C-alpha cells in the first residue's frame, strides 16, 4: 500500500508549500505591494540637484564629528543639557508615581469595572497622542519653557508605564495573590504582599527604561519651545554650525549609552 | 607505502591518530585518542557525561577543531583540509543529533533535502529547486522510515521519534560512507529509543555504512551494537564486544556502582527481543 | 531579614539598622534631587501664564471646535505622503538593518574585535537620536521635503530594527546551525537554511512593529519641514487656524489607531 504511494510520488516535482496557499490572494498581495512601492517612489519629488549640492554639506557634517565644538556655545549647550536632564528627572519621578495607581486601576483582575474603564481611557489617550503634539498644545496653554516639557513627559510616562504595569499585573501568578487574600488581608495589604513582590522587578526595569526614553524625547521638545537641549540644537542647525551640532549629538548619544548601560546593570541586579 | 599496507588501509573507514582536544578553558576533552573503524562497522561510544564522547564525534567532522592529531577518512587527513575541501569531506559523513536539530520552521521535505546542500549550488538550494534525483531519493527515504505522508508538514509539528527519523533521512541523503550519531535517543521514551536504534543499525547494514554512535544508555548499546568503546576523561578505557563489558569494566568507565542489575536487564531484554 | 536580640527577646525586623539608614538616606537624596529639579523648572516658568492656563485652554477649546471638516479635502496628499514616508523609510531601514544585525550578533559577526563594535556604534547612534533631529539634520543637508523625511525615518529605524534583530540572532538554536554545517553546506547555505528560518518570524514582527511606530513619527516630521501631514499642522498653527488644527489632530489620531490595529493583526497572523 505504502509502496503504491511512493511510486506515485517518484518522478513528481516537489515545490515548497507556499505561506499563502491561495494563489490568487498570494499574487495579488505581491503585485499590490510592488505597485504600491512604485507609486510611492513616483510621488516622492526629489530635487537631485539639491541633493547633489547637499552631499558636500553632508560630508562637512560628518567631518564635524571628528572635531566637535563644545566651546563656542558652551553656555547654551550646558544650559540646554541641564534643562533636559532636569525635565527628565522630574517628569520620570512624577510620571512613575502617578502611573502606579493608574496601572493598578487598569488591571482587570484587581480593579472594579468603572475604575478600570477610566484608567484604560487615560492610558489610551496618553498613548495615542505623541509627545511632540502634546508639547505643542501645552506650550500654547502654559507658555514657553520647561514646565510644558515636564508636563508632556510626565503625561507620556503615565501612558507607557501604566499599560505595561497593568499587563504585568494581569498576567501575574494568581495563586500567590490568593494565598495572601486567604490570610484575611485588607486590600492595601493584599496589594503590598500579594501583588507588589511579583511585579516590582519588572516595574523597576521598565521605569529605568522610561527614564532613558524621557531623556531622548526631552532632546526634541525644545523644537516646539518646551525647553531642553532641542532648542540649542535647532539653532545650531539653522546657523549651519555643524561642529556645535555634532558636539550636542555626541553628548546625547553618550548620555543615552550611559543610561542604557546603567539600566542593564540595575535590571540585572533586581531580577 | 607498500601494497599490503595500502590494502589494510583500504579496509579501514576511519582512523583517529593521537587525536587531542584542549578547550580554551584548559579542559582536556580528548587525550591522544587512537581508534580504527573498519568499513561497515557500527561502533558504540559509551562513557559518563563529560567523558568527551560528543567532542570526539565533533572533532571528526570538525564542528569542533581538534587541537592536534589526525583524523584519516579513507586516505585523507581531515584536519589538514581547507574550507572547501572540508565541506566536500563533510558530505561523506552524515550526522544525527541529540535533540534532532531539525530546522523547526522548515518542512520535513526541506529538512531532508538540506542533506544535499553540499552537492547543490546556493541559488538552487535557496529557490528549493533540487534535482529530481534528489527529490526522488528524499521520497524513498521518507517512505523507508514511514513518514512519506508527512513530507509537507512543518518539522515542529512532528513527535520526537518522527523528528529523529527525519534527522536520519537528512543524514542518509548525503550518501555518506560514515554516520556520526550523537546521543540519538537522549530525548526519546524507551520504546521509541529502541525503534530508532534498530532503524539506524538496520540502515547501516543495508547500506554497508560505518557508524559511530554516542550513547549513554549502556543496555541499548549492548542490545544493538557489535563493538563498544568506553571513554573516560578523554581516554579509551574499554574496546571490545558487548559481552566483554563486565561490571568491573563498567566500574572502570563510569565509576563505582552496582552494575549487576543493568547487565541482567539487558539479558532479559534480549530474551524478549528474541521472542518477538 | 535578620532576627535581632532586643531586651533579651528576639525581634524580627525586615532590615538591620544600617540598611534602614542607607534606605532613608537614599530616599532623602532622591527627594532633594527632585526638589532641586523642580526649583529649576519653576525658575524658568512664567507663573503668570500658568495661572492663566485654564482660561487659555478654554479659549483654545472654543476656537478649535467644531473642526473645519471641509479642510479634509486638502489633506489627501499629505496623508499619502505620510504613509509613504513611514513605509519607504521602514523598507529602506530593514534592508540596511539586516547586514548590520548580522555583523553585530556575537555568533555571526566575522570579527568580534573590529567589526562588531562598529556595528554596535551604528546601532546606538542611530537609535539614540530621534527622527525629528535626523530630519532637522537632513533638511539642512538636502533641503526640505518628503525625501528628507524618508531618509530620516530610515536612519532612525536602522538601529532599532538591527538591535532587536541581532538579539534574535543571538538567541537562535545553535544545534540547527550545526546540523546544516555538518551536511557540508557553504557559509551562505548555512545562513539560508540554518539561521534565516529561525529569525524570520522575529524579523516580520519587528518590521510591522517599527512600521507602526514610523506612522506615528512621520505624522509630526512636517513640523520641521520634512513632508507629510505635519506640514499642514505646522502652517495651521502658525496662522492660529485652530479649527484646522483640531481636524488634523483627529486625522493623526485616526492614522495612529488604524496603523496600530493593522500591525496587531499582521503580527497575530505571523506568530
Image: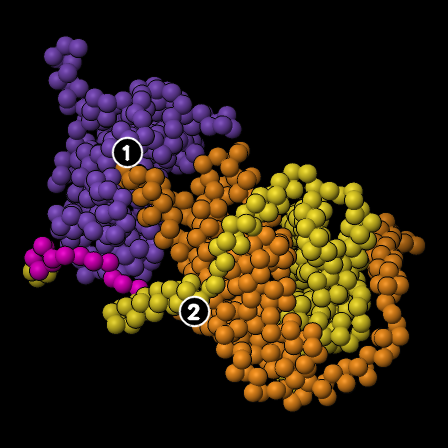
Judged from the image, the secondary structure of the residue bearing numbered disc 2 is: helix
Alpha-carbon distance for marks 1 and 2?
40 Å
Residue drawn at point x = 46 percent, y = 56 percent:
C92
According to the picture, the residue beneath numbered tag 2 turns out to be C266
Residue C87 percent coordinates (x, y): 47, 64
The magenta stretch spans residue A173: no
The magenta stretch spans residue A10: yes
Judged from the image, the secondary structure of the residue bearing numbered disc 1 is: helix
In the rendered image of the structure, the colour used to display chain C is: orange
Give the residue at the far front of this rendering.
A49
Other residues around mark 1 within 10 Å, as few (<14) / some (14–19) / many (≥20):
many
Residue drawn at point x = 86 percent, y = 54 percent:
C29
Q: Which residues are magenta?
A: A6-19
Quadrant for residue A141, please give it: bottom right
Indicate which disc residue B87 carries. Answer: 1
Question: What is the chain identity of the residue bearing mark 2?
Answer: C
Front one among A228 and C11: A228
Front one among A222 and A97: A222
Other residues around mark 2 within 10 Å, as few (<14) / some (14–19) / many (≥20):
some
Amino acid at each position: 500500500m505504502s509502496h503504491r504511494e511512493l511510486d506515485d510520488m517518484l518522478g513528481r516535482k516537489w515545490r515548497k508549500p507556499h505561506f499563502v496557499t491561495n494563489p490568487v490572494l498570494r499574487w495579488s498581495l505581491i503585485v499590490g505591494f510592488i505597485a504600491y512601492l512604485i507609486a510611492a517612489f513616483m510621488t516622492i519629488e526629489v530635487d537631485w540637484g539639491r541633493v547633489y549640492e547637499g552631499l558636500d554639506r553632508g560630508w562637512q557634517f560628518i567631518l564635524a564629528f571628528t572635531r566637535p565644538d563644545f566651546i563656542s556655545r558652551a553656555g547654551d549647550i550646558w544650559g540646554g543639557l541641564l534643562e533636559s536632564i532636569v525635565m527628565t528627572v522630574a517628569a520620570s519621578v512624577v510620571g512613575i508615581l502617578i502611573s502606579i495607581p493608574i496601572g493598578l486601576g487598569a488591571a482587570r483582575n484587581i480593579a472594579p469595572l468603572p475604575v478600570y474603564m477610566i484608567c484604560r481611557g487615560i492610558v489610551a489617550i496618553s498613548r495615542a497622542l505623541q509627545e511632540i503634539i502634546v508639547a505643542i498644545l501645552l506650550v500654547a496653554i502654559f507658555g514657553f519653557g520647561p514646565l510644558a516639557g515636564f508636563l508632556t513627559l510626565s503625561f507620556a510616562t503615565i501612558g507607557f508605564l501604566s499599560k505595561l504595569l497593568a499587563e504585568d499585573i494581569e498576567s501575574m501568578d494568581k495563586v500567590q495573590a490568593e494565598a495572601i487574600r486567604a490570610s484575611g488581608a485588607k486590600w492595601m495589604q493584599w496589594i503590598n504582599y500579594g501583588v507588589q513582590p511579583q511585579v516590582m522587578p519588572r516595574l523597576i526595569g521598565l521605569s529605568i527604561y522610561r527614564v532613558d526614553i524621557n531623556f531622548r524625547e526631552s532632546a526634541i521638545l525644545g523644537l516646539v519651545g518646551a525647553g531642553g537641549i532641542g532648542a540649542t540644537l535647532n539653532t545650531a542647525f539653522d546657523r549651519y554650525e555643524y561642529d556645535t551640532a555634532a558636539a550636542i549629538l555626541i553628548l546625547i548619544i553618550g548620555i543615552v549609552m550611559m543610561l542604557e548601560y546603567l539600566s542593564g546593570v540595575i535590571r540585572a541586579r533586581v531580577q | 607505502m607498500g601494497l599490503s599496507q595500502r590494502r589494510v588501509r583500504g579496509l579501514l573507514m576511519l582512523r583517529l591518530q593521537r587525536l587531542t582536544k584542549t578547550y580554551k578553558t584548559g579542559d582536556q576533552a580528548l587525550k591522544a585518542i587512537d581508534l580504527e573503524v573498519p568499513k561497515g562497522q557500527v561502533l558504540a561510544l559509551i562513557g559518563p557525561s563529560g567523558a568527551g564522547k560528543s567532542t570526539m564525534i565533533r572533532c571528526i567532522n570538525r564542528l569542533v577543531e581538534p587541537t592536534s592529531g589526525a583524523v584519516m577518512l579513507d586516505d585523507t587527513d581531515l584536519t589538514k583540509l581547507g574550507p572547501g575541501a572540508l565541506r566536500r569531506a563533510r558530505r561523506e559523513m552524515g550526522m544525527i543529533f541529540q535533540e534532532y536539530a531539525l530546522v523547526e520552521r522548515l518542512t520535513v521535505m526541506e529538512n531532508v533535502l538540506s542533506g544535499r546542500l553540499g552537492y547543490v549550488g546556493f541559488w538552487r538550494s535557496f529557490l528549493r529547486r533540487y534535482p529530481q534525483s534528489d527529490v526522488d531519493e528524499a521520497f524513498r527515504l521518507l517512505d523507508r522510515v514511514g513518514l512519506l505522508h508527512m513530507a509537507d508538514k512543518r518539522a515542529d509539528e512532528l513527535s520526537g521519534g518522527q523528528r529523529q527519523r527525519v534527522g536520519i533521512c537528512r543524514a542518509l541523503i548525503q550518501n555518506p560512507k560514515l554516520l556520526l550519531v550523537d546521543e540519538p535517543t537522549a530525548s526519546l521514551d524507551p520504546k521509541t529509543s529502541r525503534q530508532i536504534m534498530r532503524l539506524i543499525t538496520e540502515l547501516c547494514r543495508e547500506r554497508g555504512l560505518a557508524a559511530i554512535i554516542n550513547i549513554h544508555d549502556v543496555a541499548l548499546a549492548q542490545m544493538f551494537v557489535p563493538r563498544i568503546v568506553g571513554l573516560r576523561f578523554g581516554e579509551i578505557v574499554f574496546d571490545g564486544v558487548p559481552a566483554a563489558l563486565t561490571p568491573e569494566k563498567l566500574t572502570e568507565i563510569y565509576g563505582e556502582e552496582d552494575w549487576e542489575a543493568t547487565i541482567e536487564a539487558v539479558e532479559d531484554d534480549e530474551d524478549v527481543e528474541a521472542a518477538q | 531579614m535578620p532576627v535581632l536580640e532586643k531586651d533579651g527577646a528576639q525581634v524580627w525586623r525586615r532590615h538591620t539598622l544600617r540598611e534602614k539608614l542607607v534606605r532613608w538616606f537614599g530616599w532623602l537624596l532622591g527627594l532633594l534631587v527632585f526638589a532641586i529639579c523642580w526649583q529649576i523648572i519653576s525658575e524658568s516658568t512664567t507663573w503668570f501664564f500658568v495661572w492663566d492656563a485654564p482660561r487659555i485652554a478654554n479659549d483654545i477649546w472654543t476656537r478649535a471646535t467644531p473642526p473645519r471638516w471641509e479642510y479634509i479635502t486638502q489633506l489627501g496628499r499629505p496623508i499619502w505622503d505620510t504613509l509613504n514616508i513611514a513605509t519607504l523609510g521602514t523598507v529602506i531601514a530593514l534592508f540596511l538593518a539586516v547586514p548590520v544585525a548580522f555583523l553585530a550578533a556575537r555568533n555571526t559577526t566575522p570579527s568580534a574585535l573590529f567589526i562588531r563594535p562598529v556595528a554596535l556604534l551604528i546601532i546606538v547612534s542611530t537609535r539614540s537620536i530621534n527622527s525629528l533631529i535626523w530630519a532637522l539634520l537632513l533638511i539642512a543637508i538636502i533641503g526640505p521635503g518628503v525625501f528628507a523625511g524618508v531618509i530620516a525615518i530610515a536612519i532612525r529605524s536602522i538601529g532599532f530594527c538591527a538591535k532587536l534583530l541581532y538579539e534574535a540572532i543571538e538567541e537562535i538554536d545553535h544545534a540547527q546551525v550545526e546540523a546544516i554545517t555538518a551536511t557540508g553546506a557553504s557559509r551562505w547555505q548555512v545562513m539560508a537554511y540554518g539561521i534565516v528560518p529561525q529569525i524570520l518570524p522575529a524579523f516580520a514582527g519587528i518590521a510591522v512593529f517599527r512600521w507602526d511606530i514610523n506612522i506615528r513619527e512621520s505624522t509630526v516630521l512636517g513640523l520641521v519641514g520634512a513632508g507629510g501631514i505635519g506640514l499642514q499642522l505646522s502652517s495651521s498653527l502658525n496662522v492660529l487656524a485652530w479649527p484646522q488644527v483640531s481636524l488634523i489632530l483627529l486625522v493623526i489620531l485616526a492614522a495612529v489607531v488604524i496603523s496600530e490595529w493593522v500591525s496587531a493583526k499582521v503580527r497575530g497572523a505571523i506568530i
